[in-house]
Image (cartoon, rainbow, N blue to C red):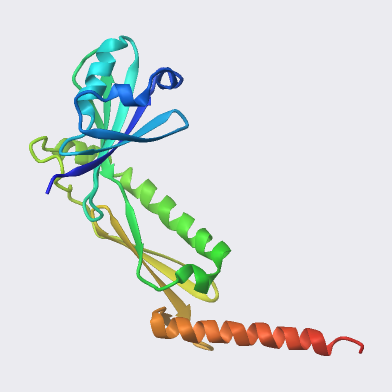
Amino acid sequence: MATEYDNILICNSNPCLLQTIDPRKIIKESPAKFISCKNGEYYYQSRRFPIDKDVYRLSKEFPGEEFIVKIWNVDALSAVMLTVIYKDGDHGEIIRIEPHFHYECRSPRLMDVLGEERFFVFFKKITSFFEKLKGLYYEEWLESYDPNEPHKAPEYDKINIQFEDDEFKVLATWDCFSYIVIEGFFKVSNKTSWKLIDGHSYNSIKHKKNESIKNENEDEYNGLPF
């Protein structure tokens, strides 16, 4: 099965330059498809190999400009993202190696249980933590990178991080190189222990929430003067 790639192309020295070029005409050698453009970044998908040859040629056509391409193999468990610089027709220089994280939530309908606002507070903390964490590794990963095995995931430490409030806890585990597993827990009533949010507990939590809302509505109704 052919390897699939995601590619993001940026002109670092002149962000407006790419907007003057038809994105489809940039691709001449790579089996790539233009997908979208956002904030001056061109996004391509390709099979078998990335768009590096086309970016190399582009740097020859526009001397003095600096192009950056971010390339990663589409693999949830071991997506290795390379950041490569091209300038003046020189062969690209890899300046950064990092995982392109994929997050999977194993607790069913966690956003529904936590509520949208609380869910995104937790999720933002998780993503911020792992983005900062991978920055501590990239120099080590650069030193150990083998161009003959471009998709081999570098060594890393499996790490857990958790955030909690008075009712819920969210645990995130760096399980594989680019794979983060998220699980939710709820606090057992009148106890300090936590219980995993699964299919059964989800129904129980949802029932309690509905009962609480019902009681609040009844209290509000009973307080009316008529």
The image quarter in which residue 56 lies: top left
In which image quadrant can residue 224 be found?
Answer: bottom right
User: For residue 98, what is the image quadrant?
Assistant: top left
| Quadrant assignment for the C terminus | bottom right
Q: x%, y% of residue 36?
A: 40, 36
* Residue 132 seen anywhere in this rendered image of the structure: yes
Q: Where is 92 relative to 134, above or below?
A: above
The spot of residue 90 in percent (x, y) is 20, 16
Q: Vertical placement of 73 versus 24: above or below?
A: below
Seen at 20% across and 33% down, the residue is: 31
Tell me how many marks there are.
0
Instruction: Say which residue appears at 40% left-offset and 73% top-offset.
Output: 108
Image location (x, y in percent) of residue 33: 29, 35
Q: Classify residue 108 as left or right of residue 50.
A: right
Residue farthest toward the left in the current orientation of the protein: 148
> Residue most toward the right?
225
Q: Residue at x 26, y 37 (%)?
A: 71
Residue 192 visible in the current orientation: no
Which percent across, then down, holds residue 144?
Answer: 14, 39
Q: Is residue 131 above or below residue 88?
A: below
Q: Nearer the viewer, residue 126 or 211?
A: 211
Q: Residue at x 81, y 86 (%)?
A: 221
